[in-house]
Amino acid sequence: MHDREPAADALPYAEVTDDGYAVRAAETFTVREFGPALLLSGDCPRCRHPVTFPVVDHVYRHGSAIPPGDPGYRTVLCTCDAEHPGRPAGPAGCGAYWTLRLEART
C-alpha cells in the first residue's frame, strides 16, 4: 500500500477537523448493523475516498440502543486506503476526523 509513489495531486496527510466534515458525513454516510457493531460508511469529507468506520457494541448495544446516559457522540477518523503524502507509518487515512452524534432508532 505504501510502496507506490502518491499521485502528484494527492492530498497531503494532515490531522485536521472542520465543522463541515461532520455535516457532510451526517448527510451522506450510511449505517449498517454488523454483529455487535455498527458500520458507518461513506466518502471522507476531506479527501473524498471511501471509508468504513466500526462503532463497537460497548457504544451501541443489543437492539441498537445507546446506553442510558450516553449522549451518543463519537469521533470518526478517515480510514481510507488512498496514498496521502506525509502520512506516518501505521495509520490509514488522510488524517481528517469529525464528531457525529448517533441516535437510537425507535
Image (tube, helix red, strand yellow):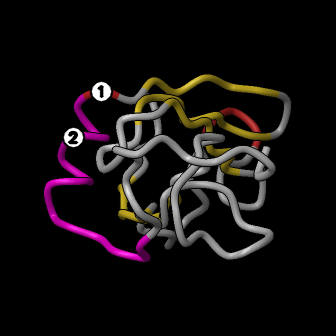
Q: Position of residue 64 (x, y in %)?
A: 62, 36
Q: Is disc 2 surrounded by few (<14), some (14 to 19) or many (20+) residues within 10 Å?
A: some
Label drawn at residue 75: none
In depth, the one of 42 and 61 nearer the eye is 42
What residue range appears in magenta? 14-27
Q: Position of residue 22 (x, y in %)?
A: 26, 53
Is 52 above or below relative to 54?
A: above
Indicate left or right for 82 with 43 as reference.
Answer: right
In depth, the one of 51 and 27 nearer the eye is 51
Is 32 above or below relative to 40?
A: above
| Residue named by callout 1 | 28
At a point 77% along the width and 27% down the height, the residue shown is: 34
| Residue named by callout 2 | 24
Indicate left or right for 51 with 46 as reference.
Answer: right
Q: Secondary structure at mark 1?
A: helix
Does the stretch in magenta take in 5?
no
At a point 73% along the width and 48% down the height, the residue shown is: 61
Q: Position of residue 33 (x, y in %)?
A: 68, 25
Q: Amino acid at mark 1?
A: Thr
Q: Looking at the rendering, in which quadrant would you find the C terminus? A: top left
Q: Secondary structure at mark 2?
A: helix
In depth, the one of 37 and 49 nearer the eye is 49
Verify CB contact (< 8 Å) between mark 1 and mark 2. yes
